[in-house]
Image (cartoon, helix red, strand yellow):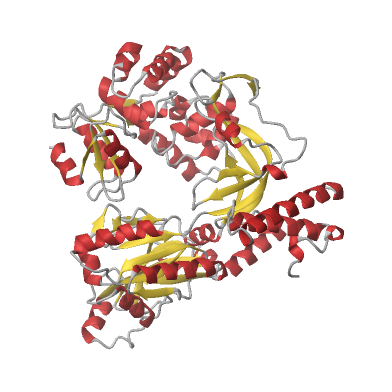
Amino acid sequence: MNKSQAQERITKLRKEIEHHRYLYHVLDTQEISDAALDSLKKELADLEKQFPSLITPDSPTQRVSGMPLEKFEKVEHRLRMYSLNDVFSHEEVEEWEERLKKLLHLQKAPEYFAELKMDGLAISLTYEEGELVLAATRGDGRVGENVTLNARTLESVPLRLRLDGVKDSVLRKKITQRVEVRGEVVIHKDTFEKLNKKLEQEGKVPYANPRNLAAGAVRQLDPKMTAARELHFYAYDIPMDLGLVTHEAVHDLARTLGFKTVEHEKKAQSLPAVFAFLEQIERTRKKFQYNSDGVVVTINDSAAFRKLGYVGKAPRGSIAYKFPAEQATTVVEDIQLQVGRTGALTPVAHLTPVRVAGTTVSRATLHNADEIERLDVRVRDTVIIQKAGDIIPDILRVLKNLRPRASKAFTFPKTFMGSPVERKEGEVAHYVTDKNLPARQREALRHFISKKAFDMDKLGGKTIDLLLEQDLIKDAADLFTLKTEQLLELPGFKEKKAENIIGGIQEKKKVPFARFLYALGIRHVGEETAQALAHAFGSLERLRQASEQQLASQHDIGDVVAHSIVDYFAEKDSQSLLDKFQRVGLTLEQPKRARSTALTGKTVVVTGTLEKFTRDGAHDAIRDAGGAVSSAVSAKTDYVVAGAHAGSKAAKAKKLGVTTISEPQFIKLLG
């Protein structure tokens, strides 16, 4: 911007900052978060630095002046690496304590051990005869990747344990025989900033955040690349029964054995002491040399921890208290449209890049026209955005006092990439009507190969783009006719890579009927609807011949979905595609015939964390028992299965009078 534009922006910023300063410091209230206010101040300081002649004494800024591997092998953890259940408020911590007291039959609160939760990559180190023999990533908790060569390059990982400090002979014998130590690999902030600065000077793209860099460095096939990243390992657990009485003693033992542990930890006799520690960490964590996204609170009594056991993928005796999502202010530089596989247009706000929750954010989804209207967001608006963990950032609010005078409301165009745009009555989304639009075809193919569809993990989005650009494919059925020699003509493809891709595609010629339906990308047919259709009709031919009335009579298949399905199968392009799938030899696996049980014909919603089932596993069990799965609770729901930490769905079930059952009751109904 020029000096005149900067003057106008600076004037508005000073006025807005002064408004919020007055609310906070004089009236003891606030409209926006501290983080958002800090972001406004930073923008002002940056502008004044760029235009120093515009600084005035009353400005808020002037108050105070080995050898590379071919691939990683999979390894199974002897002891499963569990995740932690997250909580976000003191009230949720108090509820957790009440559950602990009830399960352990305690009259008074137990003792706790609280420790900083570092934002890095969890790995497990195994020592035999005191020597490091294996380092493995968490993976899915049961199976991880062998990264031993890379872990050995970390100076903070002992290659041999320091056993001299272990005085107890029985304990020392156990540790010497075999011991597993778990911890977090992180990269310090100063190292991260130094590396990014170097990349920028070289004209390369900097890393988004320290966690991604640490995770990527640990998974480098060349250990020399890992060593160059200056990573640090911090131990947090020894998941074995070594006779240690408390979790605090586990940390002490880890330090004795030669490991670093996080210095921010506290034994707490009660929750008030835990809360005091949380508040202290939240105040000071930005000064720490590594990123942190919360505090882990564990019942300190090791015997009690083991007695509490696990629920789903998490121990009952530990929780992760997550810090509130960070907020920042930035400017909407543009609002652009993206087309999806069904032709739906999604508006995306392109933002002036800003750091939020440890990452650089430059885009935020605006969902649809209704959301844009609700926010009244416009190009050049200053907005407050929020990002928690890996969640897509949201625009929370528009600071309309900072809006430029000539701003205009955003409206959807009548055409997009030459295709007419329509919004049907009763729907929130706008759609392009041209099914052959290249951008739409690309997204449809990416959906087809995705994990919940055909799960072609050897193919990626970039390869799909390249195949389309080179005119080697026009639709999903063409994937199955690709030859190795065709791929070898593409840039960057060698024989092994080409063979792996072709082999991976051919392996998917036999696919469950429900996955196939989901992969087709029929409008309004998501994963659950595809499962329901597969079980209701059993074969593609029967489904293709079904009338709207037959479809709409099925559970959870309303008139809109039924009309969309009939429309899809009536289209010549769809019929041509399905015929091509048949010609290339695609085989659809028919769904298993459901057993007759107490759940036959019943609609079931699963909420919370179950101990014996994953969410997908519970859904499969319901279908096998003749029931139907729903993601939302309504008056038509027959049962709600409520696991640990069941939330709003359980509350809604109670309000509607829907029967809520426990996991043991659920298992009994399965028969």
Residue 664 left/right relative to 147 = left
- Compared to residue 55, the image places residue 519 above or below, namely above
Image coords of residue 338 (percent x, y): 59, 32
Residue shown at 65%/55% (left/top)?
20
Report if residue 84 is visible in the image: no
Could you say which is closer to the camera, residue 431 or residue 367?
Answer: 367
Could you say which is closer to the camera, residue 353 or residue 620?
Answer: 353
Residue shown at 22%/66% (left/top)?
306
Could you say which is closer to the camera, residue 275 or residue 235?
Answer: 275
- Compared to residue 420, the image places residue 470 above or below, namely below
Residue shown at 21%/83% (left/top)?
170
Image coords of residue 352 (percent x, y): 68, 47
Q: Quadrant of residue 197?
A: bottom right
Report if residue 256 is visible in the image: yes
The C terminus is located in which quarter? top left
Q: How many marks?
A: 0
Residue shown at 42%/11% (left/top)?
570
Residue 516 left/right relative to 459 = left
Residue 74 left/right relative to 203 = left
**Which residue occupies the extreme front position in the image?**
27
Image coords of residue 605 (percent x, y): 28, 36
Image coords of residue 443 (percent x, y): 52, 31
- Compared to residue 646, the image places residue 180 above or below, namely below
